[in-house]
């Protein structure tokens, strides 16, 4: 599968390495690809070029700027694409940018012909790409399109997660709940002085 990672930071590079190891083709999309030339282990092209060649587009940009960054090339570029949103939109003081909604919902509204799925935003990325580094835990997916959620679930399994530990919350409206967890995550991290943890749904 061809995966375009929009963003070139820590989250994007961890995901790129993990999915490449699983056999996927990875390309970074950047607003300034020349500035990143030779610094990363995968091709870096413009966002438009990365999206055009992708089966799945992953939003790994700063959440507060994600809608602006992704829509700069025109919403039509994402028609029919699976867009996996892994970002959390917060202010510098860690307040939510979308307190009455979510970034996932905002992206689906801004990219109406895309199939937006929210996931991979409820744990530190080093845990997400290496789930065996801690005990069994859960991840969540939200989206309006079941086929897109199936695609994202398969990519999560490729990171080492068991299908039973991936919880489908429902429509993209449920991304609000996953994004609200952002604040609890930081409260827990400050309490335990370590990001090496996750939550588990116990039934």
Image: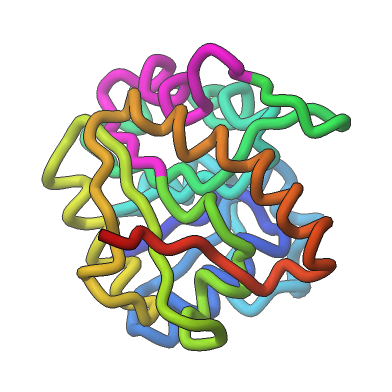
Which residue sits at x=34%, y=33%? 78
Q: Is residue 140 magenta?
A: no
Which residue sits at x=52%, y=44%? 59
Q: Is residue 101 left or right of residue 3?
A: right
Q: Is residue 49 above or below residue 127?
A: above
Q: Is residue 192 above or below residue 70?
A: below
Q: Position of residue 81 (x, y in %)?
A: 28, 40
Q: Position of residue 25 (x, y in %)?
A: 38, 72
Q: Nearer the viewer, residue 38 or 127?
A: 127
Which residue sits at x=57%, y=24%? 67
Q: How many discs mark residues in the rendered view?
A: 0
Question: Which span of residues is magenta-colored?
Answer: 98-118
Rendering quarter of residue 88:
top right
The residue sitting at the top extreme is 100
Rendering quarter of residue 172:
top left
Q: Quadrant of the C terminus?
A: bottom left
Q: Position of residue 137 (x, y in %)?
A: 42, 70
Q: Nearer the viewer, residue 79 or 82?
A: 82
Q: Quadrant of the N terminus?
A: bottom left
The residue sitting at the left extreme is 147
Q: Coloured how? A: rainbow
Rendering quarter of residue 28:
bottom right
Q: Is residue 5 above or below residue 20?
A: above
Which residue sits at x=50%, y=24%? 102
Q: Is residue 186 left or right of residue 175?
A: right
């Amino acid at each position: 599968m061809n995966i375009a990672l929009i963003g070139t930071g820590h989250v994007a590079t961890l995901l790129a390495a993990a999915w490449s190891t699983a056999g996927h083709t990875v390309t970074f999309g950047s607003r300034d690809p020349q500035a990143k030339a030779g610094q990363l282990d995968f091709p870096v092209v413009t966002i438009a070029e990365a999206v055009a060649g992708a089966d799945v587009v992953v939003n790994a940009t700063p959440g507060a700027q994600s809608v602006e960054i992704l829509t700069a090339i025109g919403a039509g570029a994402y028609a029919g694409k699976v867009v996996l949103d892994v970002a959390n939109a917060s202010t510098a003081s860690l307040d939510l940018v979308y307190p009455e909604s979510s970034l996932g919902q905002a992206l689906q509204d801004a990219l109406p012909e895309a199939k937006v799925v929210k996931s991979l935003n409820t744990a530190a990325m080093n845990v997400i790409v290496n789930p065996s580094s801690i005990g069994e835990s859960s991840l969540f997916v939200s989206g309006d399109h079941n086929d897109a959620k199936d695609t994202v679930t398969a990519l999560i399994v490729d990171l080492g997660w068991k299908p039973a530990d991936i919880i489908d919350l429902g429509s993209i409206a449920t991304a609000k709940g996953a994004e609200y967890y952002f604040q609890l995550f930081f409260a827990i991290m400050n309490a335990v002085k370590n990001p090496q943890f996750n939550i588990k749904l116990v039934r």
